[in-house]
Image (cartoon, rainbow, N blue to C red):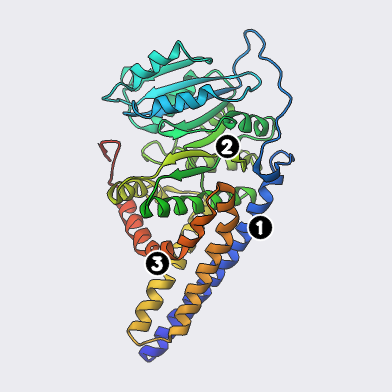
Amino acid sequence: MSSWGWGSGLLLLQVLIAGIYLWQMLLYRQAWRRLHTLSCGRAVPNGRLIEPQLSPKRPGEAPAFSILIAARNEAENLPLLLADLQEQLPVTGGFEVIVVDDHSTDDTAAIVRAAASNMPFPIRVLQLAALPGARTGKKAAVEAAVQAAQAPWLLLTDADCRVPAGWVLAYAVLAADPAVQFISGPVLLTGTGWLATLQGLELAALVGVGGASIARQQPTMCNGANLAYRRTAFAAVDGFRGNEAVPSGDDEFLLHKIHVAFPGGVRFLQDQQAIVRTAAQPTLRQLLWQRVRWASKWRHYQAAAPQRLAVLVLLANLAFPIGLGLWVAGVSAGWLALVAWGLKLAADVLFLRPVLAFLGRPQWLWWVPVLQVAYAPYALATGLLGLRGGYVWKGRQT
């Protein structure tokens, strides 16, 4: 076969892959647009929560939610999150807060203790260094918090996040359904400049795909900065057992296990009052370390849905660099490269439009072509580094 023949054949394969990707994104778009009617059968018009009738907490009754926060060297950020929690709308049963200090070298624990007397809710701090075994990492922190929690529902966020006033209430409405065991919530990256915008756009796509895949009962991903699950469900699947050695994945491994154990028990909370905000990584180096940390768990997935999706996304993102390279080398027609690239671009724009509208960032849609050009080398690099498994995070070499 001539070089032109194999080059055109390779590009035709890329066109086919991009077409499959477009079809998949259209299915996800449809599922995302249905989400607001799937939350316990309640309506959430324009992303605004319909508040339930609340009843006061009875004396001696356990709180409805235990808010679990893993923190390492977060003395600067924790006061902001605690201030947000003080502003929460009333929830039947109320909530408690448990902050787990993961071997911090700053005043993280002292700040929580000092704030405890001024809070309208119970708040405790646990220090991993003082617990038997002295383990480190977020999974160890979450496990310690789960053991100390008193509420039937565990609501998790990170110490560097900000939450709106209706955050707990939004979860409370969905958690009222006895069939619901796990709830994934949306996360929005904040910051200024091109790097923060591209990070925010990437995460918006992950949030959208995660929510849509849950709506289709084929969960792929969620974000540990904003999720909740029943304490009984955590115990039923033995928590993080089976992936304790993987530093990342305290969220998605649990999502997959609970989905298998409780079919139909996973929901996505598409409510604007549930959007958790956190700052984008300030430098490219820190961004790469964070994404390598995320990618390091991919090879440990046992569920088929996230594996298939990861392969499809990677192959679709290769459409532009492969097409450009073959065209420049003169072994394929330029129009084939444009078709493959156009299908991929159309898929991303069509899917992201309603997701970005929900997140309040419709202007990010203009950055989709930029991200698409940059994504292939970026995804390939983080994927390969993730397979290697080494990275630096929170001052630790992993």
User: Mark 1 falls on what kind of element?
Assistant: helix
User: How many angstroms separate mark 3 from mark 2 (CA)?
Assistant: 32 Å
User: How many angstroms separate mark 3 from mark 1 (CA)?
Assistant: 26 Å
Residue named by callout 3: 373
Task: Relative to 98, say whether 197 is above or below.
Answer: below
Q: Amino acid at mark 3?
A: Val
Q: Is residue 258 left or right of residue 340?
A: right
Residue named by callout 2: 274
Sequence-wise, which precedes: disc 1 or disc 2?
Answer: 1
| In the image, farthest residue toward the bottom | 2
Residue named by callout 1: 30
Q: Position of residue 105 (x, y in %)?
A: 26, 25
Circle 1/circle 2 CB separation < 8 Å: no
Q: Is residue 391 left or right of residue 27?
A: left
Question: Closer to the observer: label 1 or label 2?
Answer: 2
User: Mark 2 falls on what kind of element?
Assistant: helix
Residue drawn at x 50%, y 78% as measured from the top left: 339
Q: Is residue 268 visible?
A: no
Q: Position of residue 62 (x, y in %)?
A: 60, 15
Q: Is residue 264 left or right of residue 370?
A: right
Query: What numbered label is drawn on residue 151?
Result: none
Q: Amino acid at mark 2?
A: Ala
